[in-house]
Each structure stands twice: as structure tokens, then as C-alpha cells.
């Protein structure tokens, strides 16, 4: 194998872009966990629904995934909030095992529904608005991946801004920090939880929309991403937005570079070893608070 | 006062009727268990296989005159008083443990007389172990791991050729191309998914390539459920092979082609190992990006030019499910026909009789929709008449390009680089 600086740079860049997507998928997960301590196993399915929403928008109304993205995000937001109202609300005080079973069951339900309604076929958005690739001094990057990476950054910054700079965001963070105290201050925790689910699902939906330009779409697609997303959430420190962002990038780069430099068969081994190391030395993740 | 005699005779009569009707029903329906991946990553393939199996069962069950396939002419199985074949469908989800437990359920609870499956070699391994333990015939139409027929099993039969033969075919093809076109790929890269099928194939490809003097410049085994194949494709690019030999399932096959294009990786030829590359979804999803891929096959629609039977059967599948046969579904179809033929000749549903009949199977090549010389099993249960072909995607269609005498189009080699398409 001839290693050139160009190949290394290109691999690094690809890893970085993939990492941004991982970060966005994990962002929704970490938000829900941070606010209400519930692990949402159905999160990968929100991603899948976002991808299908983009696909149907494209194939039925010739809407490019980028144009339908706001609708996808809104739709997923509504779905997340509704799922909270109908299902999750009832298990907030339940034992952890019931919570796991509930979101796990939700995962199986959504996956099964997708397969039932849309068949197990693999789909693809085949004439996307952004196509081809751009070259930067020999480093060739797919335009859809670049756009997806950019979209992921914008969304993450947006969520961060919302949490840190708006009243509603502050209320959400307050609920995450101490639900009872927040309630005493007049914050409606039910509303905050629904909001967290809405934003969480919308993040996954946006990730799905961005991915749909270059990743095959099928009912099981969430499973491919969810394991990595869990690693990112834990690595970033449960509930930390900026931690998740950096952890996502780190995981993407380690996976792609490790696979490239050593052996692709072990690419997940590198990610999970990194995870173990961080957990050993910083049990609260890279940026989590003890 | 009722006489005890009258009561008991009424009971006896009722019992006789129940038993009688039960026996008649048992002969009317013969249950065959089929185990395929109906959910999970390969669910779309599994559905195609199930549909093909059901078409085969219908051809056996209904009189289909004019179709020269065993058991097509009459209704049902003539040696079993016209009994019908009933398929009991099970889903293994791509999981070997599930495959084994479903096989057990079909045998012990559904009382199937034989099993068919499972597409994934890894699942066929476990499911057929269960059949072997219970002494129930297991017919495998489409798993190609060579190991399957090297286990000394008594109840296992396989109609498809296995990977040893297919991989040998690859190198025969390369030799023929060299003779005809004067091109020889000096540097070969092996790019396979990392379950049993992909890794066993990689071993054999590497061995044969070295024996025949090709340089294997890269060998990559990757997890099929990857979120990205960038690391893999970058390694391929760095190795700059003339030829990539690839074994992939559907999702990863699609992702790999997308990644080749994104990263501008253009070897002279891409020689794929069936599966994902031959799935009906592959071209539907990739469109023109799927062009020029070579893939080994056991079957292609353009074989119809030489075999009217192929077109007849395909028309029936089209009418029922609006899809064409492909290499996987044509083999499943052939497997069900082969098993039904054996059950019929056995004239009984006893496992031993069916096993013996399978062993004596002798279906000539012109009565199957495969490009084989026929179906006859050796002592290991392997069909000895199987043979492969190589197809290429040209203008969005699979065309047979090898063996050259059977080819409907000339092979395009080298394939154009991405920027020139």
C-alpha cells in the first residue's frame, strides 16, 4: 500500500464528515437522556423515518431532501412530542426496566410498521440537488457528504444556541438539572419533556434527511447508526451538547482512520476501545459533569 | 334405556369419521417448511425467495400444461393421490440461532416433511444441523458455502453449485478474457463482507489467485452493517488494483458503489460474487451507477433466448408478483421443484423414503430453468451438474457475457472511469 499525504488527508476529511453526522444523530439521544434520564432505543427509527420522509417527498412530489428538510424536521418534532404524550409520559416514574422495554418496543413497532407500509426494499434518492464531488487540492469529497456535515454543524449550533441563549432553552436545562426545583419555579416539566422529545426526534429527522442523499434507505437502517450513537452519547458525557459534538467527530475520525490505517475489519474495535479508555479514565465522558 | 352397544357404536362411528377425514386431509396437504430472512437487512431478498417458492408450489399444485417442468402438467403429486404441497413459511431474520429454533419449530410443531432454506450460509449451517438431528430431509437451493456439503450429513442436499466452483469460474473467466482480449489483471484486490460466506470465499480467492500467478495486493473483510465504507475504499484506492473481487450483501453493495463514485475509485474491472449485486433492488436503487459491474450468476433472464422454459416461468412470476426472476429466486424455485419431485417419487411422506428419492433424483438440464446440465446428487448431497455464468450490467440490464458461447453480449473491459461516464 502506498500511503500518500493526499490519501491520509482525504480519509481524515471523510472521517470528520461522518463524525458530524454521528454527532447529530447522537445529539437527539443525549438531549432526551439529559433531560429525563430515559434511553431512547427507538432513536435510530426516528432517523429511519427522517430518511423515508425525504425519500417520499422526493419520489412523490419531486421535492429535494434539502427542501423537504424543514418539513421533515417539523414532522419528526410533532411525532416525538406525540410519542411523549401518548407513551413515554406514562413511564417516567416506572422502573428502568419498564422504560427500556417501552422504548425498545417502540423501536420494534416503528421498524415493523416501516417494513409493513413501505416493504423491506432498499431505496435511494437518485437525483439529488447536491451531487458529485468537490476537490480541494487533490482531496475529493462528495458534495452530499459536505452538505450533510455542514447541516449537522448548523443544527448542533442551533440546538446549543437554543439551550444556552433562549428562555425556553434555559427552562429545559433547568428541568434537566433539577426537575422539582424547576417545577417550583413555575416551569411545566411535562411541556419541557415533550419539547425534549420533539427536538430529539427532529435532530434524528434532520440527520436522516441529510443522509438520504447518499445512504441507502431501508426499514433497518437505524440499527446501523444506533450503536455508534450510544457510544457517542456516553463518550460525550450524557446530556452534554458540546461533548456530543466533539465525541461524534472523534468517533468518526477514529473509525475511518483506524480502519484505513490498520484493518477495516477492526474499525469498530477502535471506536469501542476508545470508549472503554474514556470510561475508565473519565467515567462521566469527555465533557460530562461528575 | 340406552344400550351400551348403541352408544359405543355411535362413538366408534364418529371416531372413524374424524380419523378418516384426518387421514384424507394429511394426504391432501404435504407440508414443506421454508426458512428465509423475511425481516432484517436481507428482508427484500427473503421476500423474493418466498415468492419464487410459492410460485413453484403453485405450479406443482395446479395443472399447468405446456410447461415442461417436473410435476407441472398434473395437479398435485400423482404418486400421493394428487396431494397438494403446502409451504409453511418461517423467518430467520438473518440470525443463525433464530434459524435453528425455527427449524425445530417447523419439524416438531408444524410437522413438516422436509425443510428448504436458508439463503445465508451461516443460517443454513445451524438450521440443517437441527434437521440432521431429527432425521428430516433438508434441501438447500441457494447457499454456496463449500463447507455445507463437507460435513458428512445424511439428510442434507444442495442443488446450487458452491463457492469453490464459482470462484474457479472466476479464474476460468479471467483466462478466457486474456485469450480473447489480451488483457490480464496483474493486481487483484479482494473485498468481502466478513461473515462465513465472505471470509470463506476470500480464502479461496486468495489461494487460487496465488496459484495462478496473480498478485493479491489487498484483502479486506468488512462488517456488512457499516455506516461508512470510506476506510475500506481508501485502502483499495491506495492499493490501486486492476481488478476488485467483491462479495457483498445488498445494503453494503449499494453503499460500496456510492463510495467508489464519491472517492473516484475506478479499477479496470469489478468482479462481484452474486448476492447483493444480483438483487433486483441493486439496479433499481443505483440506476446507471450500477453499470459495468461483472457478477457471477447461476442464472440470467437473457438465457430465455436459448431456453423457452425460462421465459414461460418468468412470465408466470411477472403475472403474480410483477418482478422478474433473478439468480437467487430462480434457484429457490428450482429447489422447491426438486424437492416436490422427490416427495412424489417417494410416494410417501416418511423421511427415509423422501431422502432415498432425493438421492435418486435425476432431472435433465432441459427441464429446469437453470443453465445446468441437470440435477443429480453425489454421496455428500451436492448436485454434480451445477455450473455458473458471468453477467455484466450493460445499459441497466444484466447480460450474460461468459461462457463466451452462451454470451448474449461482449464483455466491456476495462470499464470506463467515473468521470467519463
Image (cartoon, rainbow, N blue to C red):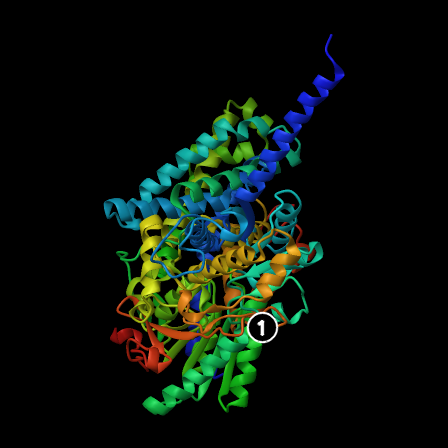
List x then y, in percent, for residue B102.
61, 48
Nearest the eye: A148 or B292: B292
Marked residue chain, label 1: B
Image quadrant where residue A273 sits: bottom right
Nearest the eye: A217 or B315: B315
From the image, tell me which residue sits under label 1: B200
Horizontal placement of B256 versus B341: left or right? left
Image quarter of the C terminus of chain A? top right
Residue at point 31%, 62% (across, down):
B311
Image quadrant where residue B292 sits: bottom left
Residue at point 45%, 39% (across, down):
A113
Residue at point 66%, 57% (across, down):
B352
Q: Secondary structure at mark 1?
A: helix
Q: Residue furthest top?
A: B1
Residue at point 37%, 52% (across, down):
B64
Nearest the eye: B137 or A175: B137
Amino acid at each position: 500500500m502506498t500511503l500518500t499525504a493526499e490519501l491520509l488527508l482525504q480519509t481524515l476529511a471523510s472521517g470528520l464528515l461522518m463524525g458530524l453526522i454521528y454527532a447529530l444523530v447522537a445529539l437527539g439521544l443525549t438531549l432526551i437522556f439529559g433531560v429525563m434520564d430515559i434511553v431512547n432505543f427507538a432513536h435510530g427509527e426516528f432517523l429511519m423515518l427522517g430518511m423515508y420522509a425525504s425519500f417520499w417527498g422526493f419520489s412523490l412530489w419531486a421535492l429535494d431532501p434539502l427542501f423537504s428538510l424543514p418539513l421533515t424536521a417539523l414532522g419528526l418534532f410533532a411525532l416525538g412530542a406525540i410519542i411523549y404524550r401518548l407513551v413515554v409520559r406514562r413511564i417516567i416514574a416506572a422502573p428502568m426496566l419498564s422504560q427500556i422495554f417501552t422504548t425498545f418496543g417502540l423501536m420494534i413497532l416503528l421498524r415493523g410498521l416501516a417494513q409493513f407500509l413501505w416493504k423491506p426494499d432498499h431505496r435511494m434518492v437518485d437525483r439529488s440537488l447536491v451531487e458529485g464531488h468537490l476537490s480541494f487540492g487533490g482531496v475529493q469529497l462528495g458534495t452530499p457528504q459536505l452538505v450533510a456535515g455542514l447541516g449537522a454543524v448548523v443544527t448542533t449550533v442551533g440546538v446549543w444556541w437554543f439551550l444556552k441563549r433562549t428562555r425556553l432553552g434555559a427552562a429545559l436545562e433547568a428541568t434537566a438539572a433539577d426537575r422539582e426545583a424547576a417545577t417550583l419555579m413555575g416551569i411545566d416539566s411535562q411541556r419541557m419533556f415533550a419539547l425534549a422529545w420533539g427536538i430529539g426526534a427532529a435532530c434524528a429527522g434532520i440527520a436522516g434527511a441529510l443522509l438520504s442523499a447518499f445512504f441507502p434507505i431501508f426499514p433497518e437502517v437505524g440499527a446501523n447508526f444506533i450503536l455508534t450513537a450510544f457510544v457517542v452519547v456516553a463518550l460525550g458525557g450524557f446530556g452534554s451538547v458540546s461533548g456530543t459534538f466533539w465525541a461524534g467527530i472523534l468517533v468518526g475520525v477514529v473509525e475511518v482512520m483506524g480502519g484505513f490505517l490498520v484493518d477495516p475489519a477492526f474499525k469498530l474495535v477502535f471506536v469501542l476501545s476508545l470508549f472503554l479508555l474514556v470510561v475508565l479514565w473519565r467515567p462521566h465522558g469527555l465533557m460530562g459533569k461528575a | 334405556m340406552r344400550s351400551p352397544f348403541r352408544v359405543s357404536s355411535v362413538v366408534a362411528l364418529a371416531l372413524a369419521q374424524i380419523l378418516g377425514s384426518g387421514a384424507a386431509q394429511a394426504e391432501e396437504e404435504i407440508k414443506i417448511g421454508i426458512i428465509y430472512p423475511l425481516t432484517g437487512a436481507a428482508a427484500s431478498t427473503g421476500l423474493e425467495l418466498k415468492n419464487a417458492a410459492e410460485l413453484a408450489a403453485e405450479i406443482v399444485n395446479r395443472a399447468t400444461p405446456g410447461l415442461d417442468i417436473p410435476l407441472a402438467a398434473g395437479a398435485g403429486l400423482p404418486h400421493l393421490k394428487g396431494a397438494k404441497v403446502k409451504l409453511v413459511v418461517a423467518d430467520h431474520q438473518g440470525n443463525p440461532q433464530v434459524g435453528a429454533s425455527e427449524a425445530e419449530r417447523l419439524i416438531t410443531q408444524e410437522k413438516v416433511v422436509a425443510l428448504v432454506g436458508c439463503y445465508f450460509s451461516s443460517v443454513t449451517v445451524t438450521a440443517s444441523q437441527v434437521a440432521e438431528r431429527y432425521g428430516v430431509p433438508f434441501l438447500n437451493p441457494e447457499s454456496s458455502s463449500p463447507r455445507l456439503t463437507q460435513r458428512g450429513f445424511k439428510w442434507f442436499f444442495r442443488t446450487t453449485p458452491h463457492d469453490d466452483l464459482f470462484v474457479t469460474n472466476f479464474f476460468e473467466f479471467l483466462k478466457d478474457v486474456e485469450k480473447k482480449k489480451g488483457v490480464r489483471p496483474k493486481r487483484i484486490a479482494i473485498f468481502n463482507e466478513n461473515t462465513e460466506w465472505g471470509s470463506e470465499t476470500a480464502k479461496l480467492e486468495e489461494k487460487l489467485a496465488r496459484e495462478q500467478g496473480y498478485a493479491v495486493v489487498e484483502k479486506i473483510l468488512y462488517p456488512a452493517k457499516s455506516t461508512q465504507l470510506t476506510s475500506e475504499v481508501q485502502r483499495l484506492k491506495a492499493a490501486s488494483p486492476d481488478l476488485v473481487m467483491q462479495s457483498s450483501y445488498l445494503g453494503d453493495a449499494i453503499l460500496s458503489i456510492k463510495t467508489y463514485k464519491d472517492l473516484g475509485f475506478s479499477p479496470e474491472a469489478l468482479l462481484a460474487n452474486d448476492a447483493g449485486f444480483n438483487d433486483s433492488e441493486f439496479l433499481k436503487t443505483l440506476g446507471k451507477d450500477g453499470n459495468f459491474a461483472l457478477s457471477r450468476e447461476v442464472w440470467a433472464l437473457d438465457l430465455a433466448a436459448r431456453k423457452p422454459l425460462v421465459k414461460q416461468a418468468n412470465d408466470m412470476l411477472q403475472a403474480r408478483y410483477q418482478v422478474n426472476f433473478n439468480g437467487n429466486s430462480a434457484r429457490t424455485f428450482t429447489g422447491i421443484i426438486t424437492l416436490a419431485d422427490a416427495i412424489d417419487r417417494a410416494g410417501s411422506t416418511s423421511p427415509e423414503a423422501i431422502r432415498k428419492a432425493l438421492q435418486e433424483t435425476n432431472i435433465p438440464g432441459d427441464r429446469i430453468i437453470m443453465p445446468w446440465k441437470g440435477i443429480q446428487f453425489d454421496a455428500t448431497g451436492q448436485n454434480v451438474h451445477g455450473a455458473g455464468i458471468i453477467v455484466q450490467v450493460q445499459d441497466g440490464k444484466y447480460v450474460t457475457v461468459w461462457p463466451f458461447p452462451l454470451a448474449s453480449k461482449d464483455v466491456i473491459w476495462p470499464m470506463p472511469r467515473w468521470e467519463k461516464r
